[in-house]
């Protein structure tokens, strides 16, 4: 697990505005969840909830049996699992701060203390790259209101802004139980229920902004032969990558269930698929049974019309180390930081 950078950690403070520095991006991360709603979920519910830390310890045994994870030092319920996501972002935050000279601001739609923060000028005023991590369960009914959509649209009119939309998977959206079981056996993660649907907030934001993408499924990526924990290389369309975001990048990190970003527009000028990922074909899945062998993993919408900013779509796990990390992944972070 990521160690701290040696500085004292703070909590329960208001954001201090970062001054603009030419050529150095100010990053902000926005978790779309209601932390209280997610952490207060009834643990007798089988579907559409995060695992508890106790469940993580059981499935991941003995990886979380050190003293730092016991009940004296770490939350054991669902809140503990949510904190794992926060901790796993620290490497990305440190890398970006070192590259840009600006600390990364991290926000939540509704935080641990119950404070609600929509995306508005308080976040956007000192942000050049906004990363929206879509890990809200659909049943929590998080929706971007019109004021948020308008604020982001206006912000994107500013040249060189970048909106990173990162809705997570949509596992088991079918009503057919046998298909849900097939999906579960495909990804093989005991901590993911037969139905776990994420991303209503990002979906509503994409609809409002005219982003023609839908996050689908939770697909297990193929691995390198003989190395079951090493994800297979990306299929990169480098001729379309005019920003150089995949320069020096061969893989993202390995995660058992990644979303397919289905493009819903036939206009190839609106959005570009910059990379796809090979799927593990030895485990049946409705998506592969339909003839698909790869899924869309990284997309780019270049500036168009009044929008001077870029829009990227990539899964939020690409920016965490909870599921591992590589030099290739760090290079991707640096490319995004330096775009």
Image (cartoon, helix red, strand yellow):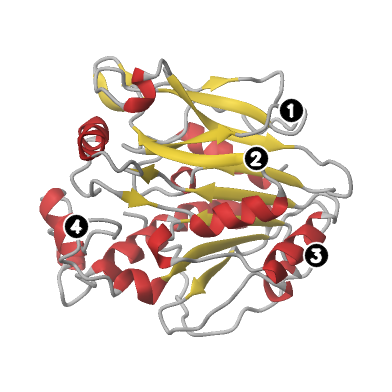
- Tag in front: 1 or 3: 1
Q: Is residue 257 left or right of residue 89?
A: left
Q: Earlier in the sequence, mark 1 or mark 2?
A: 2
In three-dimensional space, the C-alpha distance between marks 2 and 4, rounded to whole angstroms, equals 32 Å
Q: Are marks 4 and 3 in contact (CB under 8 Å)?
A: no
Specify the farthest residue to the right: 306
Residue at 61% over, 34% down: 264
Disc 4 is placed on an element classified as loop
Provide the residue designation for mark 2: 212
In three-dimensional space, the C-alpha distance between marks 3 and 2, rounded to whole angstroms, equals 31 Å
The image position of residue 328, as x and y in percent, is 50, 32
The image position of residue 265, as x and y in percent, is 67, 32
Provide the residue designation for mark 3: 20
How would you rate the neighbour count of disc 2 (Cα within 10 Å): few for under 14, some for 14-19, many for 20 or more? some
Q: Earlier in the sequence, mark 4 or mark 1?
A: 4
42 vs 175, nearest the viewer? 175
Q: Is residue 93 left or right of residue 68?
A: right
Residue at 41% over, 36% down: 253
The numbered mark at residue 46 is 4
71 vs 237, nearest the viewer? 237
Q: Are marks 1 and 2 in contact (CB under 8 Å)?
A: yes
Q: Residue 245 occupies which quadrant of the picture? A: top right
- Tag in front: 3 or 2: 2
Q: Are marks 2 and 4 in contact (CB under 8 Å)?
A: no
Q: Earlier in the sequence, mark 1 or mark 3?
A: 3
Residue 247 seen:
no
Provide the residue designation for mark 1: 267
In three-dimensional space, the C-alpha distance between marks 4 and 3, rounded to whole angstroms, equals 47 Å
């Amino acid at each position: 697990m990521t160690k701290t950078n040696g500085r004292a950690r703070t909590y329960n403070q208001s954001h201090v505005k970062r001054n603009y520095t030419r050529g150095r991006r100010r990053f902000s991360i926005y978790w779309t969840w209601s932390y209280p709603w997610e952490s207060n979920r009834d643990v007798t519910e089988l579907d559409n909830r995060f695992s508890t830390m106790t469940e993580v310890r059981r499935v991941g045994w003995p990886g979380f049996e050190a003293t730092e994870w016991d009940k004296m030092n770490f939350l054991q319920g669902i809140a503990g699992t949510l904190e794992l996501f926060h901790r796993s972002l620290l490497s990305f935050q440190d890398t970006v701060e070192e590259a840009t000279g600006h600390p990364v601001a991290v926000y939540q739609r509704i935080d641990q203390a119950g404070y609600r923060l929509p995306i508005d000028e308080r976040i956007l005023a000192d942000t050049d790259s906004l990363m929206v991590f879509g890990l809200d369960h659909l049943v929590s009914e998080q929706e971007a209101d019109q004021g948020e959509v308008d604020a982001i649209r206006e912000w994107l009119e500013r040249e060189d802004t970048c909106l990173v939309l990162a809705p997570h998977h949509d596992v088991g959206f079918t009503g057919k139980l046998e298909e849900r079981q097939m999906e579960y056996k495909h990804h093989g993660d005991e901590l993911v229920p037969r139905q776990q649907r994420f991303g209503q907030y990002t979906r509503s934001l994409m609809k409002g902004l005219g982003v023609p993408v839908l996050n689908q499924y939770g697909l297990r990526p193929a691995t390198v032969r003989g190395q079951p924990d090493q994800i297979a290389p990306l299929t990169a369309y480098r001729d379309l990558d005019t920003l150089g975001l995949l320069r020096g990048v061969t893989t993202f990190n390995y995660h058992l269930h990644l979303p397919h970003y289905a493009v819903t527009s036939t206009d190839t000028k609106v959005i570009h698929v910059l990379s796809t990922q090979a799927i593990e074909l030895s485990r049946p899945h409705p998506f592969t049974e339909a003839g698909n062998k790869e899924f869309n993993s990284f997309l780019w919408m270049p500036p168009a019309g009044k929008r001077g900013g870029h829009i990227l779509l990539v899964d939020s796990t690409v920016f965490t180390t909870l599921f591992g990390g590589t030099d290739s992944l760090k290079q991707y972070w640096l490319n995004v930081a330096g775009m």
